[in-house]
Amino acid sequence: MRTLLSTFLLLTCLLQTPVMAQMADQDATFTNYFRRETDWTAGDATISIPLPGNKVLWLFGDSHIDGYQAADTSLPCQFQVRNAAMVQEKSHPDSMITLLGPGPNRTLFKLYSPEPPHHYFWPGHGYATADTVYIFLNRYRDTVEIINNDSVPKKYFLGTYLAKMTLPNLELAGIVALPDRAGIVFGRWVLLPVESNYAFIYGNRLESSGGLLVWKPYVARVLSSNPLGPWQFRTASGWSTNPQSAVTLCPAYGVSPGFSVCQRSGRFYLFTQENGYLECGKGRKIYAIGGMSTPWGVFSERVVIYTIDNEYDEKYLMTYNTYAHPEWTNNAKLLLSYNVNDKYDKTAPNICPSQCTPGQPDRMNADTYRPKFIRVPWSDLINGTPPSVQGGASNNRNAPGDNLLELRCSPNPAKDFVEVSVSLETQTSVRIDILDLTGRLLHQEPEEVREAGYQRWQIVVEQWPAGIYLLRVRAGGQESVRRLIRQ
């Protein structure tokens, strides 16, 4: 009787599917501003710089220009430019002007025209002062290497540059290379604190921590009127002109490749995202760390403010690049953005939506490559209010208290087979059970020890009767359950 009651309660939870209340809420209005059908139509990065005259400059990385097809809300799989920008009027936020470069290749920021093959800039952050906008750019070169007789794409970082655009016409006045500063990629974010003549330039560097490579944040300062002047780097005891003396702002945690630092009520907060290593379904948590009394922290108190839940075709998208947009604070709520992206992974084609699988129509849903926006109340961050657990509408997620593992099953509904994937933080033993709605065990995968990371199993279901089953995974003392539908 107890077993039947427990199973009934579990099934009730799964069918009702409560969801975790979040500190931040989606901002559908702002997201819709970027659902454009002409000029810039999709892209990533989504970095904003406030300009004089009540305007905002938006910077993007790989971007689609035109190409939108209204009949199926699609874009070509291949983007057209490596970077682009838009100018937004704050009084008319739905109206934007796209900025592109000259020539047949309309990429905005170029070192040469034309660029050498496979060389390009991705934008960092920047700031406006007097009659100039300064923008940090990261330069890369793409290549392909043969590893174990397989072609593996590689990306090489070539250095950080600083672009100068004149106001008010935003004409590109030049791009200059910056010196290497102890391998730290500066320009990820720029903060101009209230009542300060300094621009605080934030960067990060890949370092080994606990057997993993993580991005550790650093900060330098320079007079905002002359970013090419002498820089000072934050050390353990003060400031130094030697970048080798710089210390991390966040000893306890790593940050994502892009991150932000904002000021509110005399306190400073760092916003970042769980590093998903550009894998679909990973890195969905957005964090706030702080608030500290200085722009250099030390940042140590971390809280999850949002867990990204964007899917396409019942599969998680790749999510990355959380950035803050403090110039758009409304009703004491801070605006943040993050990027989504579909991709084709030939080693695991069922993990991502993989709309651009070779041999398929060369188009994708436009919204799977457009930025999404959320808002978080500053009062919750300042007062340290944690998110609470509440009920919600069905979204086919695990129930609260049962969401201890990152568990996926696809396709679902299934016909011939289902691929089960679990994200493991450490090496551990994994057990997979499939039960019917009475709690009776119908199928069990052999229990085995698996390494940390995404682990996958393929289970044949073609002989099962059509209906609803319960997929249960236990690993390292944790458990998650999902509904599995056999067509």
Image (tube, rainbow, N blue to C red):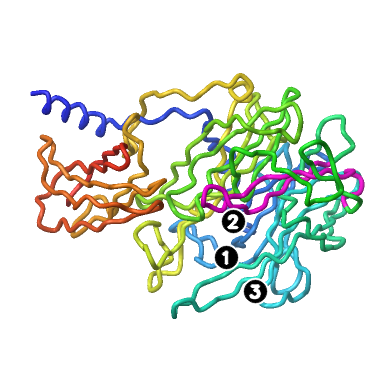
Q: CA distance from mark 2 to mark 1?
A: 8 Å
CB under 8 Å between discs 2 and 1: yes
- Tell me the kind of residue under disc 2: Gly
- The residue carrying pointer 2 sits among few (fewer than 14), some (14 to 19) or many (20 or more) residues within 10 Å by Cα, namely many
Residue 113, image x and y in percent? 77, 75
- Outermost residue toward the top? 383
The answer to whether 255 appears left or right of 88 in the picture is left
Which of 111 and 30 lies nearest the eye of the viewer? 111
Which of 120 and 56 lies nearest the eye of the viewer? 120
> Does the magenta run of residues contain 203?
yes
- Toward which corner of the image does residue 195 lie, by quadrant? top right
> Does the magenta run of residues contain 255?
no
| Residue at image mark 2 | 43
- Residue stretch in magenta: 199-227
The answer to whether 315 appears left or right of 368 in the picture is left
Say above or below: 183 vs 382: below
CB under 8 Å between discs 3 and 1: no
Pick whichever of labels 3 and 2 is earlier in the sequence.
2
Q: Secondary structure at mark 3?
A: loop
Main secondary structure of the magenta stretch? strand
| Residue at image mark 1 | 79
| Residue at image mark 3 | 118
Q: CA distance from mark 3 to mark 2?
A: 18 Å
- Tell me the kind of residue under disc 3: His
- Tell me the kind of residue under disc 1: Phe
Say above or below: 283 vs 68: above
